[in-house]
Image: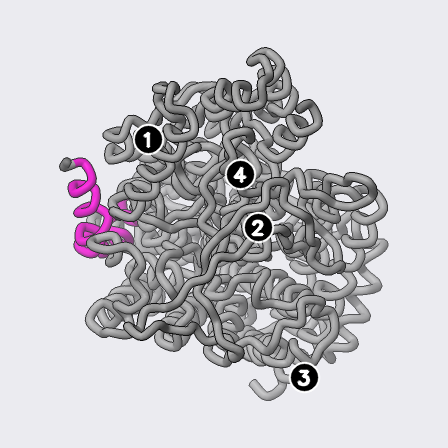
Amino acid sequence: MTPNGLIQIGLYFVALIAVTKPLGWYMARVYEGEPTFLDPVLRPVERLLYRLFGVRPEQEMSWKTYVAAVLVFSAVGLLILYAIERLQGLLPLNPQGFPAVPTDLAFNTATSFTTNTNWQNYAGETTMSYLTQMMGLTVKNFVSAAVGMAVLIAFIRGFARHNAQTIGNFWIDLTRGTLYILLPISFVIALVLVSQGVVQTLSDYVTVPVVQPITYTQPKLDANGNPINDANGNPITETVALQNQVIAVGPAASQIAIKHLGTNGGGFFNTNSTHPFESPTPLTDFLEILAETSIAAGLTYTFGKMVKDTRQGWAILSAMLIVLAIAMLSLYAAESAGNPRLAALGVDQTSSDINPGGNMEGKEVRFGIPRTAIFATATTATSSGAVDAMHDSFTPLGGLVPLVMMQFSEVILGGVGSGLYGMLTFAIIAVFVAGLMVGRTPEYLGKKIESYEMKMAGLIILIMPFVVLIFTAVAVSTDVGKAGIFNPGAHGFSEILYAFTSMTNNNGSAFAGLNGNTPFYNIAGALAMLFGRFFLKIPTLAIAGSLAAKKTVPVSAGTLPTHTPLFIGWLIAVVVIVGALIFFPADALGPIVEHFQMITP
Amino acid sequence: MLSQFRPAIVAYIVFTIITGLLYPLAVTGVAQVIFPQQANGSLIMKDGKPVGSTLIGQPFDDPKYFWGRLSATSPFPYNAASSSGSNLGPTNPALIDEVKARIDALHAADPQNTQPIPVDLVTSSGSGLDPDISVAAALYQLPRVARVRGLSEAQVRALVDKYTEGRWLGVIGEPRVNVLELNLALDVVK
């Protein structure tokens, strides 16, 4: 660890806190229907859209109608994206002539982008046409984020309102979130990314001659593209001279901007933000990770403003950032320490101003260790799952940090919207447990927390670990599951655990050595993503409906204040004990075992 | 639930047009006008033809060139049409073998050099296309390149410095040397 690295981490937090209030203030105005500076342009568009949709803006929804709208909209989007992937061979804007995406992969990808997971079993530059990237994936990047934010806003209305039967109109929340928040900010970010070197073009891939022609060997193929084997059944190889390099380009910047802003994380290219066309400079790395966390942080202020007590929002954000900072420093320390097995070979892993040092396998020189630590922690704390380094090649404890961040049910900032409604569910549990300890009726933000809310909160907390652990157990005990493993030993188990933790929590990052593009992982993963996303939204909105209908109880001497340092500490403890500790036995079998193997010569 | 179908279908189609067509085309249009060089891949042009991209590395294993990071793309290194990391875990014996092979290759190309090797020179990048190496990795290779080309170390050092980029604002990211630009410049000199 170097002073520069610590300063870089500090600057990230300064920048994040600086954008929280202005962005949160603006988002509150958008969702409460107040005038904004974009009204002259967007108001007429908005009115036109409502007419086309056939919705009456003044008509609000009960929580059940809101759930129905979310589910129907998501299902329609899933089917349309699936259709685009399957038909891309017949559609325009396909300069490389890619054929239809295979059925199981198309289903996995459609689910992945609908659930804001953006798990990549496909490689963008070898699978998806420009049309699929734009009209399929980019669209999903916008609307799945807008759906998450809409559900959060409906949830907050549950606290903000009293004696109410409705929690807002989904179509309005969806439309305003997309038009007023996601689109304009993405447009600006996209242009900054292009200025740094992120590509944005509809032209074909570029072919250039290589400066030093090299030769390489590859399996010899017959006329049908199948490998030819010799008499002993071994593949025959041939030596090929490499004269040219084909460089994949495309309309990347427009997608990458919303990929980060909407905590989506699905890359335009296979290797996501490690790819120099996806994040060419330290500035883009800084901007992408700031964009990725800014809406989640800003929404805590939006929440405070909507419940008319901004201290509540700052308290929640403080709990999140304390956990985030501890995790980031842990990852930074683990990766800076490097790999003792390489040290034994005489490799120089000391960090200095001319040597990034540490464990550089799977990392990019322009980012080095500190930026990778910031990125990897924040990308798993939010549900983004974009990567600027290969998590599979992290040291065991370095890889444990992203895993644990996801095991917190994505409530440390979390996905746009979904992170905060998850964290508020933990806050409900925290006041409930605290209430039990002192024998008082628990209340949060003036609403009594009763058995119905606790049942729903219990469901929300338990579904995720249940899905993760069951699917992991199935995968490690079946041949189709084990077939995907790339790295041997404890690390192979970590790959599977990481995959289902990531998909169920709608993160999308991976220990990417695991070959997930098989029918088993495509389908099991799609189910995990659907459970993780929609099973949680239903009880969340049920709590919102129930709370909105209650009357507000005035603050009394018996009320537990929920904006104090004591409550912040208590909330963190509940998130750790109730949330992440469930996974300790599983984590012990993977990264923790591997750590001890690595440090034992 | 049924009453939600019309808004769902219409809204999805409308948002597809706005965010999937108008938005990316608008970004493309503006980008092509104000940042055409970057938007098209930061290509290095020679005699009107592209000879590489400043952002995409190329494979080098000739001692007269500076070598870049290891690349795990398939079927050949630095395949810019199919980016990929190695994904090798820290305790995977295959990782140790790869690092050893690279150390051996560096020693074979420059037997006199017994300095410790900077870690980025023996490990694979995340993208498989990393255009950069650390300043330490460039300095490690500098005596070899100078000797093979018959240049003075000061001449090569001047070029290394020219293609070194510092941290953004002096703080963010890592200092780095662009391998392709450096090697192209070396070919111009000698």
Q: Give the CA distance from mark 2 to mark 3.
A: 30 Å
Task: Report if residue B48 lies within the magenta region.
Answer: no
Binning the other alpha carbons within 10 Å of mark 2 as few (below 14), some (14 to 19) or many (20 upward) gives many
Q: Locate the C terminus of chain B and report the quarter of the image it occupies.
A: top right
Left-right relation of A360 to B37: left
Amino acid carrying label 3: it is Arg
Amino acid carrying label 4: it is Phe
For the question of whether residue A377 can be seen, the reply is no
Q: Label 2: state its secondary structure.
A: helix
Q: Label 3: state its secondary structure.
A: helix
Residue topped by disc 4: B60
Residue topped by disc 1: A333
For this orientation, the residue located farthest to the front is A231
For the question of whether residue A244 can be seen, the reply is yes
- Label 3 or label 4, whichever lies nearer to me, is 4
Q: Position of residue B158 (x, y in %)?
A: 63, 15
Q: Give the CA distance from mark 1 to mark 4.
A: 33 Å
Q: Label 1: state its secondary structure.
A: helix
Q: Position of residue A548 (x, y in %)?
A: 49, 65
**Residues drawn in magenta:** A573-599
Numbered mark located on residue B6 in the image: 3
Q: Give the CA distance from mark 1 to mark 3.
A: 53 Å
Total numbered circles: 4
- Do marks 2 and 1 share a chain? yes
Q: Residue at x 70, y 70 (%)?
A: A94
- Tell me if residue A209 comes above or below residue A502 in the rendering: above
